[in-house]
């Protein structure tokens, strides 16, 4: 609930701090005293459009701070704060602040953390519910009527939402499967052509590297084959180095026994013959390994180029071509199995759709029954509020299938007819602002157990009525405030007498300076203010006596 409102330099208010408690708080004062300024200030801190005209003349800036306290934060409000990364410790107040400069620029804060004005506006619906002469939000807004009716009915919407989610999920999978199958059929001929091309080539994993290596070796053999041919001529024939070494070794072998040094020379020459023989063998092996085969090179290059061309065509690496083949085969196989999958998904979509319809129809029946009970409850409140000729109806309308959702298959709107024979029309289109406020009061009383914003404010709900009607309004406001917080700006002494707390708004002048102030009245002050409201400018003893009777009668 709203616990404190601090205002600085707003129009005629220089500095003001108000503390509020539970129950019914009433605000009274003469016409023009500045009651609307308080509501404008509260609207500013709740995210309303910043009007530079609110800044008090001569002030550098204006500010409004509102403090709210909760036993437990409403889950929806907590979710909004979590999304904005704002933490509120248990037992700590939620403090909203708005600053406004004469040029119209403003800043917003929540618990001293800078935020957007949009966040204040988003939070406002959980904090304050304002009903006035020109109400266009809260109960008047049809977007919230379905939720209010469901709360009144005690309807459980989770089953419908769950059934709707499963139905939509199945429908989405069915649509995707249909799209994939249709596309696969369109691509079938192309897939077959591509698969035939890949199958003819039959690419293997790692083949590109092997072909590239073979090609490189063949190109190298082509380059050095001439040198090897020259070497072959040197090492072959009767005058080759190896033949000469062998002739020398045979001759030395005949004379080696004649001297030790000749024997050593023969051993070295034998080693040279062996080494030369091994060199000849190596040269022969190299020549055989590096034999240049133009046809083999051409075949390797052709396959390598074909593989790379296919990889470019399918926008993948050469080593990924085998996987591409498998994917194409799977796509073609899916065309055959897709029809069976489609049949299964269509059956699942029918089943989940039927379950959703059953749940939504049960919710619809619940809503229709609850609408009749709500209409009767509101009708009981209309007579005492001097709306005897008016009628109230909760319209539950089945929507076309394309507008069904997690909320069910209905739209809900509160309608009224103010005169006999008049057509029903939306709450927002009622002609009289006073009638609208009383309709809203009747509806709030009927929906009293369903909760709402933390603080409810009625602005001059009693305009144009008096006597028994004003008493009925006061009694209902007090009833609504019995377990929460309700503030009422009122001109009616019958309503003012019902307040748990009473604030008087008044203007004062010092020279050329006019200020608006607010005073929390004690019992004596309440008697005097209610007497003023009863008698006008001159408070008479009779008015004070009647004020006492009003205060004693509540």
Image (cartoon, rainbow, N blue to C red):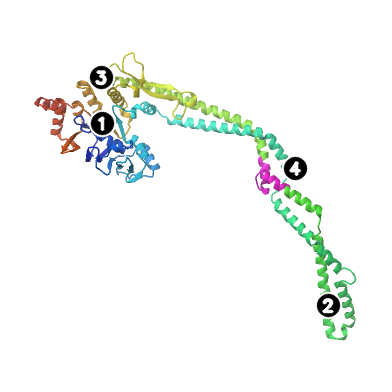
Q: What x and y, as percent, mark residue 456?
A: 29, 32
Q: Is residue 414 above or below residue 90?
A: above
Q: Is residue 255 above or below residue 418?
A: below
Magenta region, residue range: 306-327
Judging by the rendered image, the residue that carries numbered circle 1 is 481
Query: Would you call the spot at circle 3 few (<14 residues within 10 Å), some (14-19), or many (20 or more)?
Result: some
Judging by the rendered image, the residue that carries numbered circle 3 is 386
Tag 2 and tag 1, C-beta contact below 8 Å: no
Tag 3 and tag 2, C-beta contact below 8 Å: no
Q: Quadrant of residue 278?
A: bottom right
Q: What x and y, as percent, mark residue 294?
A: 81, 54
Query: Would you call the spot at circle 4 few (<14 residues within 10 Å), some (14-19), or many (20 or more)?
Result: few
Judging by the rendered image, the residue that carries numbered circle 2 is 269
Judging by the rendered image, the residue that carries numbered circle 4 is 200
Instruction: Give the spatial CA distance, label 3 vs label 2.
Output: 139 Å
The structure residue drawn at horizontal position 35% and vertical position 40%, both measured from the top left corner, is 117
Instruction: Give the spatial CA distance, label 2 vs label 1.
Output: 125 Å
Q: Earlier in the sequence, mark 2 or mark 1?
A: 2
**Residue 309 magenta-drawn?**
yes
Q: Quadrant of residue 431?
A: top left
| Disc number lying in front (3 or 1) | 3
Question: Which label number is shown at residue 394?
Answer: none
Q: Earlier in the sequence, mark 3 or mark 2?
A: 2
């Amino acid at each position: 609930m709203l616990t404190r409102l601090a205002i600085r330099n707003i129009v005629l208010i220089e500095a003001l701090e108000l503390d509020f408690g539970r129950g019914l708080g009433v605000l009274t004062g003469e016409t023009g005293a500045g009651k609307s300024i308080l509501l404008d200030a509260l609207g500013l801190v709740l995210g309303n459009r910043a009007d530079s005209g609110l800044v008090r003349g001569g002030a550098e800036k204006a500010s409004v701070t509102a403090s709210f306290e909760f036993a437990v934060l409403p889950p929806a409000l907590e979710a909004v704060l979590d999304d904005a990364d704002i933490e509120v410790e248990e037992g700590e107040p939620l403090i909203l602040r708005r600053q406004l400069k004469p040029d119209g620029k403003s800043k917003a804060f929540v618990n001293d953390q800078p935020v957007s004005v949009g966040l204040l506006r988003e939070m406002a619906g959980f904090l304050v519910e304002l009903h006035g002469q020109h109400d266009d939000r809260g109960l008047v807004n049809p977007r919230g009527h379905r939720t209010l009716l469901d709360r009144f009915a005690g309807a459980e919407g989770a089953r419908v939402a769950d059934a709707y989610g499963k139905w939509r999920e199945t429908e989405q999978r069915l649509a995707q499967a249909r799209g994939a199958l249709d596309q696969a059929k369109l691509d079938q001929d192309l897939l077959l052509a591509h698969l035939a091309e890949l199958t003819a080539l039959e690419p293997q994993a790692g083949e590109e590297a092997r072909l590239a290596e073979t090609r490189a070796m063949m190109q190298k053999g082509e380059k050095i084959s001439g040198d090897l041919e020259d070497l072959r001529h040197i090492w072959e024939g009767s005058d080759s180095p190896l033949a000469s070494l062998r002739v020398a070794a045979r001759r030395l072998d005949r004379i080696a026994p004649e001297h030790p040094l000749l024997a050593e020379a023969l051993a070295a020459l034998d080693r040279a013959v062996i080494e030369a023989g091994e060199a000849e063998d190596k040269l022969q092996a190299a020549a055989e390994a590096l034999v240049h085969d133009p046809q083999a090179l051409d075949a390797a290059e052709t396959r390598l180029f074909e593989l790379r061309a296919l990889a470019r065509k399918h926008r993948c690496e050469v080593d990924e071509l085998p996987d591409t083949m498998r994917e194409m085969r799977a796509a073609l196989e899916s065309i055959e199995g897709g029809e069976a999958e489609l049949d299964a998904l269509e059956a699942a979509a029918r089943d989940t759709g039927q379950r959703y319809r059953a749940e939504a129809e049960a919710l619809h029946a619940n809503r229709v029954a609850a609408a009749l009970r709500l209409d009767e409850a509101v009708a009981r409140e209309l007579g005492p509020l001097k709306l005897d000729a008016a009628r109230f109806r909760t319209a539950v309308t089945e929507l076309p299938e394309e507008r069904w959702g997690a909320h069910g298959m209905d739209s809900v709107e509160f309608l009224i007819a103010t005169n006999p024979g008049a057509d029903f029309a939306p709450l927002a289109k009622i002609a009289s602002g006073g009638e609208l406020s009383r309709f809203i009061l009747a509806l709030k009383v009927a929906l009293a157990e369903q909760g709402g914003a933390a603080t409810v404010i009625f602005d001059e709900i009693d305009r144009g009525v008096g006597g028994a009607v004003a008493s009925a309004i006061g009694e209902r406001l007090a009833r609504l405030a019995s377990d929460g917080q309700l503030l009422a700006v009122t001109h009616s002494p019958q309503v003012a007498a019902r307040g748990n707390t009473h604030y008087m708004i008044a203007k004062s002048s010092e020279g050329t300076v006019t200020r608006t102030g607010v005073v929390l009245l004690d019992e004596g002050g309440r008697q005097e203010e209610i007497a003023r409201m009863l008698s006008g400018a001159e408070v008479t003893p009779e008015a004070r006596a009647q004020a006492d009777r009003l205060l004693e009668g509540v």
